[in-house]
Every structure is written in structure tokens, then in C-alpha cells.
Image: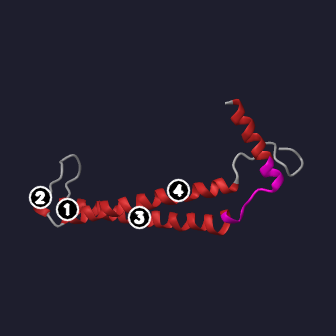
Amino acid sequence: MSTNRIPDDPIRTAPADLYERLHNVDDRLFQLRREVSEIRREYAALRRHPDALAVDNLGDPIDPVAAALGAETALAMADEKLDAADIWLSRARGRYATRLKLTDTAADELDRRRNRVERTR
């Protein structure tokens, strides 16, 4: 890095582009949480049919209903972590990322570099 405050490597991504990507992450996280919740409900439904459940004999003996409950509980813990991720992503986006922008000079330079790359493709 040089001795001044300008780093040797150029800015590759505008804050607005990163902000948009955060929205895409939010959308995928929402879909993931919805799928995890759906799978949890299905494991809960399986537990209501204990006579229809069995387990393999590859490990320690376990009751099939306990196995379904274990899967459901583990998914609930995963959902808690996904909820925390949602909160932190929201904070990153709302409190910090939304405030960032490039200076006019930096934005012009980024546009020039992007145009050069487009012409060479």
C-alpha cells in the first residue's frame, strides 16, 4: 500500500451494487428459512405416526419418534441461527450499507474502468 490514503488496488464494486447484493442474500435467506420451517413441520407430522416409523441398525439404538424429534429440534436451532443472521444482515444493510456511496471522482473512475473492461471483452 502506498503512503497516502489511496490504496494501490482500485475499487471494484460500488456500495450501491453491494447493497443490492445484500437484498439478494435476504431473498435467499427468506426462502431458506421457509424451507427449513416446512421440513420441521413435516418431521412433527411424522412424529404423530409412530407406528409408521422405523430406524436403521447402523448406529446406537434410537426410538424412531425420538429421531424425528431430534431432527425437528436441530432444525429449530438452525432456524434460530438463521433468524440471527437475518437480524445481522438487516443491521448491516440498514445501519451501515445504506449510508455508503462513492465520491463523484471515485464513481467516475469506476465507470471508466468498467467501460475499459467492456471494450476488451
N-terminal of the pair, mark 4 or mark 2, is: 4
What SS does tag 4 mark?
A: helix
> Residue 52 vs residue 30: left or right?
left
x, y percentage for residue 117?
71, 35
Residue pictured at 14% horizontal, 64% vertical: 49
x, y percentage for residue 121?
66, 30
Residue range highlighted in magenta: 98-108
Residue sitting at the far top? 120
In the image, 54 versus 86, the foreground residue is 86
As measured in the structure, the alpha-carbon distance from the residue carrying label 2 to the one carrying label 3 is 27 Å
- Asked if the residues shown at circle 4 and circle 1 are in contact, with their CB atoms under 8 angstroms apart, the answer is no
**Is 26 part of what is drawn in magenta?**
no
N-terminal of the pair, mark 2 or mark 1, is: 1
Q: To which residue does mark 2 refer?
A: 52
Q: To which residue does mark 3 refer?
A: 79
As measured in the structure, the alpha-carbon distance from the residue carrying label 4 to the one carrying label 1 is 31 Å
How dense is the environment of label 4, judged by Cα within 10 Å: few (below 14), some, or many (20 and up)? some
In the image, 104 versus 60, the foreground residue is 104
In the image, 28 versus 86, the foreground residue is 28
Q: To which residue does mark 1 refer?
A: 46
Q: Nearer the viewer, mark 4 or mark 3?
A: 4
Label at residue 108: none
Q: To which residue does mark 4 refer?
A: 25
